[in-house]
């Protein structure tokens, strides 16, 4: 049972991964192949060829050994001493092991595909980060392949080439012509050999690398045997040394292989940094460490073969860890043996001394050739697999589409050819000493990205991140990132900075040009994790009026006809919560499933199209009133809850589609909105020519006037500010603000504010909570960048019979204290007030008397033990509403007064919204008064504030 469980787990993950790859957004869904939409599926029934040993252990061992084991061990011990050499290996392998742990964790969290490190990073961090790192990893492999090819050519020419200066050859086997073009010819031939091996396929590559692996292991065996079998001897140092000691004739020309001696060991324990005879530069700890670390950066060679492995999730962690442990042991054993048997001069002046002390000198030369050739092939096939994965993901559109082509066996031959072509271009440079540092930095950047991917997955705490390899923590990921970053700048700070800048440039390019992927974005998981944490920290008990901001719930019936209002409310939210609410009438008991789930994508598409920062909240209810109550109760989380309800006005205007056909083409999902989002509309009652009401044929649902006013009353009971928006069905934000930009010298955009309750002519106060809330919203609108050129105009209604002197000064002082810049206008309204009082006559006194009698009746009812709810209703209805005392003539006169002050006409008006009457029977009259008051005013907001929002304190 225990042996079958991992296999079952792997098959399950593979099936899940395959289903994800079939998503339409994946780039290869459009590619036509005889067997299916993706090349991978054409041979999916054939098992992958390579096992753990051939596919991971052998390539990783050869990449990590390369030439460092043959040509740089003596350099390392000779310059830094045995103690520091071992310390360097421990530090370097510590950094490498941190990355290996991250690779193992990601590779065992699901089924891997072709691409190795690129596949891991892109699926964890998203296409932007993965694509940029993938390009850099591809270029690093291409340059590394060219670097190893040229290194092999230089080694061959050094052994078999004729001296370029025309001097006589030192031995009879130096027969090859030398020079730039001859070296390029030799390099091209070696690159063609690598190309042929890689074109045949991963299986032949595995066999070739295995043969090379046997050769390298055999050579290593002879080296270890030579330390014990070879007698002490004197070695002649290279005659071409450029060291100043040799040039001046004062330095030694020979050195000793002493065999195992304590004196030799004691002489090699401590550091002795001198001039490197190959470059003429003085060595330091940093430079020696950088050279040594270059030979340890081959840990991704096995991961690059992920697409050709039988079981990548099984093979990559075991094979990589095995190779890392093996190379660490070999390097340290060689360092100890060298320190015990070779004197300091030999180690510092002859880096190829292992050949001179070997039981047969050509063995080491063969080992150098073999390891270099295998490293070149490993980088070429690794580059082709990365390029194939990049092309298949369509991150760069049609640019890389030719690289998708594969053979019948699944070998991406087109990617191999393109990679070889780029290698051939790099070979023309001839010398890659400077590119060698860039290659190493690119590799380190990839390793850091793998650590970052694992760290992000761990910090996101996603339930689906449960790798079977558990020997890692976020601490190891951080240590790996820091270690790689330090090594990058230690090797070359300029190249490291340039590489990071190049990566960021690629990241931005992919972000803006690549299509949306279906891989999942780790940023979303991290944002969710952090937002949840900060929402818990947002304590509503610590709210203060100084930091108040509008958090708006805008109720939308048909979003296609409400784009003007949606965009306008987005301007007055002031970085606050903005929720688009919608109520669909229905009963879940009578429906087979939730009809709202399929609508969210259409709403979010509209949000993206309008470029607003809003959430969407939909609900299903038996009435509009109950639905809005649901949304007011449940919208938001913690301290982020709507405090302001915005409703469209209840009038007789028909909804109009504000999205043109061209816009609807761009916004394809918006067609669904038209089908799903018209269950009610605030204009659902139409007046016929004879004054009767009939249903709106567009909506098919009726929202009565009383229910509409009841919604307003409900919101105020819940201590929510209420805003009614009228005449925004034709509002065009761009057109309204274009006038301001066309005349920069003078403002042509005006926002009119009437902070007086126009339905209460007997109360002209402009400093109550509602009036201040009105001023606050107008000020917030004026603070938005696109509305900053707008001019606020405050209109203060005054009567000649009352105290007028100082009213303007008082209001100006208040605005100054509130830091609100506005123009103040005094508006006489004696004629309008006269219309009101003439109609009332002595009616007020009678109504007040009736109110007192009704109040006394309620109190007597309480003493008699009547029901509490009935008492409250009688008490509320006992007061005469202001709506009974306002005539249509007065309201029309006030409406005309507002229109007369609009010179020039404003873009939007802010009016005072009084509370609905306590008597529900008067809701219709209340709504009629609001309709007369705002008739033909253009875009208007009727605003009622219930909470203090302005303070003069610091």
Image (cartoon, rainbow, N blue to C red):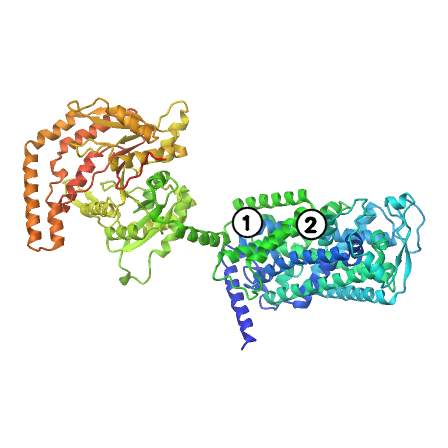
Q: Is residue 236 above or below residue 822?
A: below
The part of the image, by quadrant, that contains residue 496 is: top right
Q: Residue 89, image x and y in percent? A: 71, 57
The numbered disc on residue 518 is: none
The part of the image, by quadrant, that contains residue 359 is: bottom right
Please identify the quadrant where the C terminus is shown: top left
Q: Is residue 473 visible?
A: yes
Dot 2 alpha-carbon crowd within 10 angstroms: few under 14, some 14 to 19, many 20 or more: many
Q: Is residue 229 above or below residue 118?
A: below
Query: Alpha carbon of mark 2 to alpha carbon of mark 1: how far?
Result: 21 Å
Q: Is residue 312 above or below residue 612?
A: below
Q: Secondary structure at mark 1?
A: helix
Position of residue 513 in the picture relative to residue 273 (left or right): left
Residues tagged 2 and 1 counted as in contact (Cβ below 8 A): no
Position of residue 544 in the picture relative to residue 245 (left or right): left
Position of residue 133 in the picture relative to residue 625 (left or right): right
Viewer-closest of 703 and 45: 703
Q: Residue 466, image x and y in percent? A: 52, 64
Position of residue 505 in the picture relative to residue 569 (left or right): right
Q: Which residue is mark 1?
A: 128
The part of the image, by quadrant, that contains residue 547 is: top left
Viewer-closest of 511 and 227: 227
Looking at the image, which residue sits at the far bottom? 1
Q: Residue 157, image x and y in percent? A: 85, 52
Dot 1 alpha-carbon crowd within 10 angstroms: few under 14, some 14 to 19, many 20 or more: many
Q: Is residue 341 visible?
A: no
Viewer-closest of 490 and 414: 490
Q: Secondary structure at mark 2?
A: helix
Q: Which residue is mark 2?
A: 439
Q: Pick whichever of labels 2 and 1 is earlier in the sequence.
A: 1
């Amino acid at each position: 049972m225990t042996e079958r469980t991992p296999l079952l787990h792997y098959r399950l993950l593979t099936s899940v991964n395959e289903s994800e790859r079939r998503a339409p957004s994946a780039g290869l869904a459009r590619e036509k192949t005889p067997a299916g939409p993706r090349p991978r599926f054409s041979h999916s029934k054939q098992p992958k060829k390579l096992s753990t040993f051939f596919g991971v252990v052998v390539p990783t061992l050869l990449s990590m050994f390369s030439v460092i084991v043959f040509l740089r061990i003596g350099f390392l011990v000779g310059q830094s001493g045995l103690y520091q050499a071992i310390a360097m290996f421990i530090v370097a392998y510590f950094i490498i092991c941190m990355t290996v742990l991250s690779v193992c964790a990601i590779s065992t969290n699901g089924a891997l595909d072709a691409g190795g490190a690129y596949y891991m990073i892109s699926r964890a961090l998203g296409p932007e980060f993965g694509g940029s790192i993938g390009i850099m990893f591809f270029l690093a492999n291409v340059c590394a392949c060219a670097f190893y090819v040229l290194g092999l050519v230089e080694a061959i020419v050094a052994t078999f080439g004729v001296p370029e200066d025309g001097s006589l050859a030192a031995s009879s086997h130096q027969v090859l012509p030398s020079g730039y073009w001859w070296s390029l010819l030799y390099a091209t031939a070696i690159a063609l050999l690598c190309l042929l091996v890689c074109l045949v396929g991963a299986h032949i590559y595995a066999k070739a690398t295995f043969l090379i692996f046997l050769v390298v292991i055999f050579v290593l065996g002879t080296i270890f045997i030579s330390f014990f079998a070879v007698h002490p001897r004197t070695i002649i140092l290279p005659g071409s040394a450029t060291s100043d000691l040799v040039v001046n004739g004062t330095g030694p020309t020979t050195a000793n292989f002493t065999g195992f001696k304590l004196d030799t060991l004691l002489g090699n324990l401590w550091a002795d940094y001198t001039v490197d005879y190959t470059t003429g530069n003085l060595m330091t700890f940093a430079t020696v460490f950088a050279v040594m670390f270059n030979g340890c950066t081959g840990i991704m060679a096995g991961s690059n073969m992920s697409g050709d492995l039988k079981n990548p999730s099984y093979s990559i962690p075991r094979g990589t860890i095995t190779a890392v442990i093996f190379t660490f042991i070999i390097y340290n054993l060689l360092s100890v043996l060298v320190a015990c048997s070779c004197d300091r001069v030999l180690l510092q002046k002859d880096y190829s001394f292992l050949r001179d002390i070997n039981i047969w000198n050509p063995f080491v030369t063969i080992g150098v050739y073999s390891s270099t050739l295998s490293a070149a092939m490993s980088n070429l096939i690794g580059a082709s697999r990365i390029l194939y994965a990049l092309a298949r993901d369509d991150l760069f559109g049609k640019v890389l589409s030719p690289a998708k082509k594969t053979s019948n066996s699944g070998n991406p031959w087109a990617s191999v050819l393109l990679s070889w072509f780029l290698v051939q271009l790099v070979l023309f440079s001839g010398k890659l000493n400077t590119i060698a540092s860039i290659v190493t930095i690119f590799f380190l950047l990839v390793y850091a990205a793998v650590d970052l991917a694992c760290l992000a997955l761990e910090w996101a705490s996603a339930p689906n991140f449960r790798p079977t390899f558990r020997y890692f923590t976020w601490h190891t990921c951080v240590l790996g990132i820091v270690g790689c970053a330090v090594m990058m700048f230690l090797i070359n700070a300029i190249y490291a900075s340039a590489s990071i800048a190049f990566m960021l440039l690629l990241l931005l390019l992919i972000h803006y040009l690549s299509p949306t992927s279906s891989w999942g974005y780790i940023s979303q998981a991290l944002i969710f994790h952090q937002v949840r944490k900060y929402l818990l920290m947002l304590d509503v008990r610590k709210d203060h009026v100084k930091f108040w901001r509008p958090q708006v719930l805008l109720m939308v019936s048909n979003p296609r006809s409400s784009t003007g209002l949606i965009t306008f409310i987005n301007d007055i939210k002031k970085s606050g919560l903005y929720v688009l609410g919608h109520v669909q009438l229905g009963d879940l008991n009578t429906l087979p499933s939730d009809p709202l789930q399929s609508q969210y994508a259409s709403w979010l598409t509209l949000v993206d199209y309008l470029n607003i920062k809003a959430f969407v909240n939909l609900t299903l209810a038996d009435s509009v009133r109950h639905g809005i109550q649901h949304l007011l109760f449940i919208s938001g989380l913690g301290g982020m809850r709507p405090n302001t309800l915005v409703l469209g006005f209840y009038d007789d205007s028909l909804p109009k589609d504000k999205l043109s056909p061209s816009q609807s083409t761009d916004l394809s999902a918006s067609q669904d909105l038209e089908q799903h989002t018209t269950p009610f509309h605030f204009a659902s009652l139409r007046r016929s020519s004879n004054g009767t009401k009939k249903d709106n044929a567009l909506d098919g649902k009726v929202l009565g006037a009383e229910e509409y006013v009841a919604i307003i009353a409900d919101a105020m009971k819940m201590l929510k500010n209420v805003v009614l928006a009228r005449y925004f069905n034709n509002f065009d934000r761009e057109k309204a603000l274009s006038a301001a930009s066309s005349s920069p010298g003078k403002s042509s955009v005006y926002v009119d504010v009437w902070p007086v309750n126009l339905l209460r002519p007997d109360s002209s106060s402009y400093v109550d909570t509602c009036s201040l809330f009105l001023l606050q919203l107008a000020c917030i609108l004026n603070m938005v960048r696109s509305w900053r050129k707008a001019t606020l105009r405050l209109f203060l209604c005054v009567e000649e019979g009352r105290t007028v002197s100082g009213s303007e000064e008082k209001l100006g002082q208040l605005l100054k204290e509130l830091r609100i810049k506005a123009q103040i206008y005094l508006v006489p309204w004696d004629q309008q007030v006269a219309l009101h009082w003439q109609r009332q006559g002595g009616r007020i006194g009678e109504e007040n008397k009736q109110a007192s009698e009704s109040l006394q009746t309620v109190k007597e009812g309480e003493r008699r033990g009547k029901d509490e709810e009935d008492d409250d209703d009688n008490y509320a209805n006992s007061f005469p509403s202001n709506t009974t005392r306002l005539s249509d003539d007065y309201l029309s006169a006030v409406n005309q007064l507002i229109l007369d002050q609009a010179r020039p006409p404003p873009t939007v008006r802010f009016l005072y919204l009084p509370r609905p009457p306590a008597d529900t029977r008067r809701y219709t009259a209340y709504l009629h008064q609001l309709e007369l008051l705002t008739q033909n005013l253009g875009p208007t907001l009727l605003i009622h504030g219930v909470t203090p929002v302005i303070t003069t304190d610091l």
